[in-house]
Structure formats: structure tokens, C-alpha cells
Image (cartoon, rainbow, N blue to C red):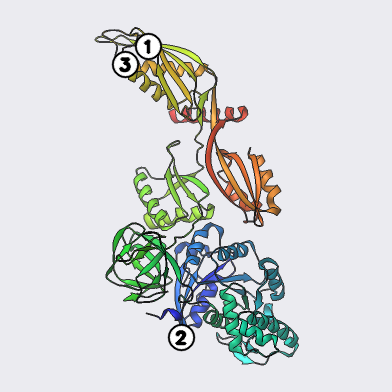
């Protein structure tokens, strides 16, 4: 086990395409953890090993790899950059003590940069910044730095600055040590003199850095104000204090593809990122008391499960971060979230997909175990004698839905089981069977997310599906009270069928699906047949007269009828009631209803007008707005029929900055012109099915 004070857990985060995986590969190679530099575009990256990642050349899940650097163990947590996989980002950041935010030197601060910076702020995580791709055409360190200061505010200070740019990038200047590091083509740099023309620039940036370091402690600030020079060790000490308090955000420059500037970044990680000892976690006991989980091997064991992968061959793989105590191979642990004991087999450290067996995983470290029976993402594993629960992971709710159906007949059960396995693996993916439409619906964060799910379904479980838009669970109701009568009379060779009912059908309580009553006098309908009348009406409610949708908000009263002493039966009265209801409903001004959802959209103020205009186009009613920090929250009522692709629309309108939530509120009448289209479509679908 590595001593917890020598562990650094670092999440690599950024906008998509900034080079996180390439940086992780460069770190692995420099540290000697791999013997060749993996390339994303060649499919040889250690961290992007999933077949979908290799095919698409983008990260779609969080990968872990430990490296050794300056006698420390650095657990690299490489997260995806695309919005659809934000759940993976949140899971990776949950178990890190700090993040390294990558910024593309050509594109500068992008939407994803702002989002991950915000996520780090929510968790109060220290941030380092690596300005990557300095060797690309149009790369500019100064422009990128200005963008960081403008968007992220005070505390952005360079730690290294590039020597040259674009094709002329040669190295970086280490501002703390006042030295130049030049790369001549190999992975390692050589020390050199700082180019003369950079002297003034270096001193100006170094002055900023020293001032930021001095503010890290009162002692250093007094020394600085008295005009004394801070030593390199004191600068590192002051920067570390500032980084941990989120007052200082050091910026380094380089090119991950050429391993240029990556060594100084690793040095900064070791010197500036807090160890698990310096950032203890809080947990809750069974009695509800808050306790500190110290990164001490002799403390009671407590770990958080932050990722689960489902594999039909290997079984379930559980990735966990230990916060206190230690866990041994071939032991037992207690799942405090589910109150279950789990048998632990062989423990591993993961390096991409490669498993390195270990006898134990100590405090502050990240490990993996296979085939836990009940444990899922977000669960706490601990010592049964002293159970505690660590705070879970706040995953966003899935917002984009499609319906799935099997390509091959008879695959329904296999699809359900396979999708359930994938839902265990990914908390931002949800499966449900719609009782209203009968469709199997899958929910995710966007189109790409569900594309990947469908591909995994095919590759891992051998199941192929068709995708189609979800059907809207329309309802039908009536607007007028009517009376209806129906006599069911059938004479055959033996005993006949006879049932005769008079129904009063009227609009009911909108909150209730159906109310039934009876006002029978003198035994016109014997009491034993009244339940059959109610049953017949209930069956008729399943399919309305307009478009075959279920009927809601009606009140039916049985007020008269007649019977035959021999031929009457429960079946006869059930049929009579069903036919009487259908006949009456057709005369009671039937209307089509649609589900209306309460929608809350959070957007930057600059996009508010566009978002409100789009909601109006979607037949939405704006209820109000209120500020939320630098964002505005727009509340509206919008028909579900208009919301199926809203996740994609909102992302497009707000350049990915907008988020929304929605929940069912009530049913409302469909506008007449739309109702005619829906009824015509339903009729055509029925006719096609009959053929």
C-alpha cells in the first residue's frame, strides 16, 4: 500500500477534444507506466480501450491509471469531454482531490471549460490549468490566458509559459526556478538559458506568481511586503496553500502530443495537489451523526463506489475509492447503503483495461473488485462493526428519450434484462415500460449517449433494436352530459344472453380517472349484475371513440335497465354496459387531451430571449422567471409532444450552457387542428394493423 500522504487523485476534465486522453497517455509514458506513447487517433491509447471509444476516437467513459512520479502515486482519472457523458465526469470528480482543466490553445475557453470549472466549484476542488496544443496553428498562450482571467476571474497565474508557439514551439519557462526547458525531439527536456527577448515577459509573469504565493500565508506575505526575495521552496509552499483554498489557479503550457510541458505539470501535481490526508471526507453514522473519515490505514474501513461496469463475461466490475482504513482481497465488507454483506474476491488496481492484482487497497487509493452481488454506483462499503455512509454522487437526470423494440421476435425479455444491466452501469441512463403507450422507453443525456447504449447492447449482449420516437400518452374525455341506453339481446339454441342498461354519462373530476354510481329502484337491474356493469364500463374506458386512447375524468351512473330471469348473466350486462358507454361517449362531445409538463430551464441571461421564443413556438406558456446567480430560471408549462427533442434543441440554442428539468403536471385539451391530425394518424395506424 502507498502511504496516503504520497497519493494524489487528479481528474482530467475539459471541453471535448482538448486532449485529456492524450495528456494522460503522455503522463503514463513519461512516468514509465507504459513503454510506448499511446495515440487516440491510432486506437492505441491505454485510457480509451472500449471498442466504441476506439471507433469514435472520443472518450465515453471514465478511465483510471496510476503512475509513479517523484516517489508519489498519482491516480489519473481521465473523464469524457462531451455533454452526453457528464455523469462520468461527475463520478470521476467525486473521488478526486483536485482537477486539471485542459484548455485548447487555439479554441481558448469553451462551453465545456466553463461547465467543468463550475462542477469543480460545486465540490470546492482545487484546479490546475494546462493550456494544451501550443504547437497547433493559431495557438496563442496570451489570448488563452486572457480568456481564462476573463471567464474564471482572479487567481489565474502562469506557472510555466511557452517558448515559441505553433510550429516554433520549443519548450517552456519554469517561472519558479527561472529556467528554460527545451525539447529537442525526445520525451525529456534539457535545461537552457531563457531566451533574451523573453526576459521582461518572464519577470512580469513571475512577479504575479510570487505575489500569489505570498498571499498563501501571513508569514510569506510579511516577508514579501518587506521586500525580501521568496525562495523557490517558499513559492511552492505559498502556491500550495493558495491552490488548496481555491485562491490560486496555476496555469501551465505545452503540447501533450509531444510530451512537451507535461513533466512540469506532473511536478506541479505532486507539489500543489492536496493529499487524501490533507482533505479528509465527512460521513454519516447510522445514528445520523457526522464523522470525519481520516486517511489512516488503522481507522475503520470506508469506501465509496463511484463506477460500475457490466460485462457478460467478466461480470460486474466495481471501482471504489477508499477514504479511511484498508480493504484486503478475499475478505468481507458491509454495504451500508443496502444493509448487505458482500464477499470480496481478488482486488485490482486498474490501468486502463489492464488489471494489476493487489493484496490490499489503502486509504486515499482507488481500487477495483469483480463480482460484487448487490453493490451499485454511489454505495458506501465499510466495516460492519462501525457502519457509515459517505455522501453519494449527484448525477443529472436523463432528459432525452427514445422507444426501443426488438429487431428479432422473442427478444423482448433479453432486451429488458440487458438494458437493466446497462442501467446498473450508468446512473444517467434509465429504462421504463410506459403503461400508457406500451412502449419500452430508454432515457439518456442526448443522442450520442443513447447511440452508445444501443451499440453496447449489440456488442455486449448480442441484442439488436429498432429506435423510434416515443408515443405521446394522449387521453380522451367528454365535455357534455348525455344519457345512453343499450340492450344486449342474443338468442341462440340454448340459453340466450340478455342485458339492458340505461347510463348517465357526464364530465367527472379532472383529478380522477373514473367514478361509478347507481340509482336503481325496484330491482330493474338485480344487485348481483351491478359490478358487471361497472366492469363493462371500465373495459370500454381503455379505448376511446376518437383515436383509441384511454378515457379519463368521466362519471357514469347506472339509473335503469331490465333483465331476463333465464337469459341474463354477468357477461350480458358487461357487454351492454360497454356498448352503452361507447354509444353515449360518441354523443357527449368527446375531446382529445394531452399531457402538460412543468418545465424549468436554467440559462445564461444572454440566451433568455431565444429560449423563451423557442418555448412559445412549442406551445409553451411562460409562468415566470427568476435570477439564479449569473443564470435565469424560466418556468413554463409545455405539452409533452413538443419536448421529446428539447435536450438537443436547448443545447443548440444555448451552445450547451442551458439545462432543464421537467415533470408531469396535468392533462389539457389538444387544439382542434392538431387533434384532427392525431385522430387521422390513429385511424390510419389501425387500418394498417388490420391489413
Q: Marks 1 and 3: which is nearer the front?
A: 1
Mark 2 touches mark 3? (CB < 8 Å): no
- 600 relative to 167 in the view: left or right: left
Q: How crowded is mark 3: few (under 14 residues within 10 Å), some or many (20 or more)?
A: some
Mark 2 touches mark 1? (CB < 8 Å): no
Residue at (69%, 52%) from the top-left corner? 607
For marks 2 and 1, give the CA distance.
Answer: 90 Å
- What SS does tag 3 mark? helix
Q: Can residue 274 be seen in the rendering of this structure? A: yes
Sequence-first tag of 2 and 1: 2
Q: Marks 2 and 1: which is nearer the front?
A: 1
- What SS does tag 1 mark? loop
Q: Residues within 10 Å of mark 2 (few under 14, many from 20)?
A: few
- Tag shown at residue 529: 3
Sequence-first tag of 1 and 3: 1
- 13 relative to 391 in the view: left or right: right
For marks 1 and 3, give the CA distance.
Answer: 12 Å
Residue 659: x %, y % from top left: 59, 52
- Reading the image, the residue beneath label 1 is 520
- Tag shown at residue 71: 2
Instruction: Please determine whether, in this image, residue 172 is positioned above or below residue 679.
Output: below
- What SS does tag 2 mark? loop
Nearer the observer, 522 or 386: 386
Q: How crowded is mark 1: few (under 14 residues within 10 Å), some or many (20 or more)?
A: some
Residue 469: x %, y % from top left: 51, 42
Q: Can residue 60 be seen in the rendering of this structure? A: no
Quadrant of the snapshot with the C terminus: top left
Quadrant of the image occupied by residue 569: top left
Nearer the observer, 411 or 480: 480
Amino acid at each position: 500500500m502507498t502511504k496516503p500522504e504520497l497519493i494524489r487523485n487528479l481528474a482530467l476534465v475539459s471541453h471535448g477534444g482538448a486532449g485529456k486522453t492524450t495528456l494522460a497517455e503522455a503522463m503514463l509514458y513519461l512516468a514509465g507506466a507504459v513503454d510506448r506513447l499511446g495515440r487516440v487517433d491510432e486506437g492505441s491509447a491505454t485510457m480509451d480501450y472500449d471498442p466504441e471509444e476506439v471507433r469514435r476516437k472520443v472518450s465515453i467513459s471514465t478511465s483510471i491509471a496510476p503512475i509513479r512520479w517523484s516517489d508519489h502515486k498519482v491516480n489519473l482519472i481521465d473523464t469524457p469531454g462531451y455533454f452526453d457523458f457528464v455523469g462520468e465526469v461527475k463520478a470521476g470528480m467525486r473521488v478526486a482531490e483536485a482537477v486539471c482543466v485542459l484548455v485548447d490553445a487555439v479554441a481558448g475557453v469553451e462551453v465545456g471549460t466553463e461547465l467543468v470549472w463550475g462542477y469543480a466549484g460545486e465540490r470546492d476542488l482545487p484546479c490546475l490549468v494546462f493550456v494544451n496544443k501550443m504547437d497547433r496553428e493559431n495557438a496563442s498562450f496570451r489570448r488563452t490566458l486572457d480568456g481564462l482571467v476573463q471567464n474564471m476571474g482572479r487567481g489565474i497565474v502562469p506557472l510555466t509559459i511557452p517558448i515559441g508557439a505553433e510550429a516554433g514551439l520549443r519548450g517552456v519557462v519554469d517561472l519558479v526556478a527561472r529556467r528554460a526547458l527545451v525539447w529537442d525531439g525526445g520525451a525529456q527536456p534539457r535545461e537552457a538559458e531563457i531566451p533574451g527577448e523573453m526576459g521582461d515577459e518572464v519577470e512580469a509573469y513571475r512577479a504575479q506568481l510570487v505575489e500569489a504565493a505570498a498571499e498563501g500565508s501571513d508569514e510569506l506575505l510579511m516577508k514579501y511586503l518587506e521586500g525580501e526575495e521568496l525562495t523557490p521552496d517558499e513559492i511552492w509552499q505559498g502556491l500550495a496553500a493558495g491552490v488548496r483554498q481555491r485562491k490560486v489557479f496555476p496555469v501551465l503550457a505545452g503540447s501533450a502530443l509531444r510530451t512537451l510541458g507535461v513533466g512540469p505539470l506532473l511536478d506541479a501535481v505532486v507539489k500543489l495537489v492536496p493529499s487524501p490526508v490533507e482533505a479528509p471526507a465527512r460521513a454519516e453514522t447510522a445514528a445520523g451523526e457526522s464523522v470525519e473519515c481520516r486517511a489512516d490505514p488503522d481507522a475503520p474501513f470506508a469506501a465509496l463506489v463511484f463506477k460500475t461496469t457490466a460485462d457478460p463475461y467478466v461480470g460486474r466490475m466495481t471501482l471504489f475509492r477508499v477514504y479511511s482504513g484498508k480493504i484486503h482481497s478475499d475478505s468481507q465488507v458491509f454495504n451500508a447503503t443496502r444493509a448487505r454483506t458482500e464477499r470480496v474476491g481478488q482486488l485490482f488496481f486498474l490501468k486502463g483495461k489492464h488489471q494489476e492484482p493487489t493484496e490490499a487497497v489503502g486509504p486515499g487509493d482507488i481500487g477495483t473488485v469483480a463480482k460484487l452481488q448487490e453493490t451499485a454506483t454511489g454505495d458506501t462499503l465499510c466495516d460492519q462493526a462501525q457502519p457509515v455512509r459517505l455522501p453519494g454522487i449527484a448525477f443529472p437526470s436523463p432528459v432525452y428519450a427514445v422507444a426501443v423494440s426488438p429487431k428479432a421476435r422473442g427478444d423482448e425479455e433479453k432486451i429488458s434484462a440487458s438494458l437493466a444491466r446497462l442501467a446498473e452501469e450508468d446512473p444517467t441512463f434509465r429504462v421504463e415500460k410506459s403503461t400508457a403507450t406500451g412502449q419500452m422507453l430508454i432515457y439518456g443525456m442526448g443522442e450520442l449517449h443513447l447511440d452508445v447504449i444501443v451499440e453496447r447492447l449489440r456488442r455486449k449482449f448480442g441484442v439488436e433494436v429498432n429506435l423510434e420516437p416515443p408515443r405521446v400518452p394522449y387521453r380522451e374525455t367528454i365535455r357534455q352530459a348525455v344519457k345512453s341506453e343499450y340492450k344486449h339481446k342474443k338468442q341462440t339454441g340454448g340459453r340466450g344472453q340478455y342485458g339492458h342498461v340505461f347510463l348517465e354519462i357526464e364530465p367527472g373530476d379532472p383529478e380522477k380517472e373514473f367514478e361509478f354510481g347507481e340509482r336503481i329502484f325496484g330491482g330493474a337491474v338485480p344487485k348481483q349484475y351491478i359490478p358487471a356493469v361497472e366492469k363493462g364500463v371500465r373495459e370500454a374506458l381503455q379505448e376511446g371513440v376518437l383515436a383509441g386512447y384511454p378515457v379519463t375524468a368521466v362519471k357514469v351512473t347506472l339509473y335503469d335497465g331490465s333483465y331476463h330471469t333465464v337469459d341474463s348473466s354477468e357477461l350480458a350486462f358487461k357487454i351492454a354496459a360497454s356498448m352503452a358507454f361507447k354509444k353515449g361517449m360518441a354523443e357527449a362531445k368527446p375531446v382529445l387531451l394531452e399531457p402538460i409538463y412543468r418545465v424549468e430551464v436554467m440559462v445564461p441571461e444572454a440566451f433568455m430571449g431565444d429560449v423563451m421564443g423557442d418555448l412559445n413556438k412549442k406551445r409553451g406558456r411562460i409562468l415566470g422567471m427568476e435570477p439564479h446567480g449569473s443564470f435565469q430560471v424560466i418556468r413554463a408549462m409545455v405539452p409533452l409532444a413538443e419536448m421529446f427533442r428539447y435536450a438537443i434543441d436547448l443545447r443548440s440554442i444555448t451552445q450547451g450552457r442551458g439545462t432543464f428539468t421537467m415533470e408531469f403536471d396535468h392533462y389539457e385539451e389538444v387544439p382542434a387542428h392538431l387533434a384532427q391530425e392525431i385522430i387521422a394518424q390513429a385511424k390510419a395506424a389501425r387500418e394498417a394493423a388490420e391489413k
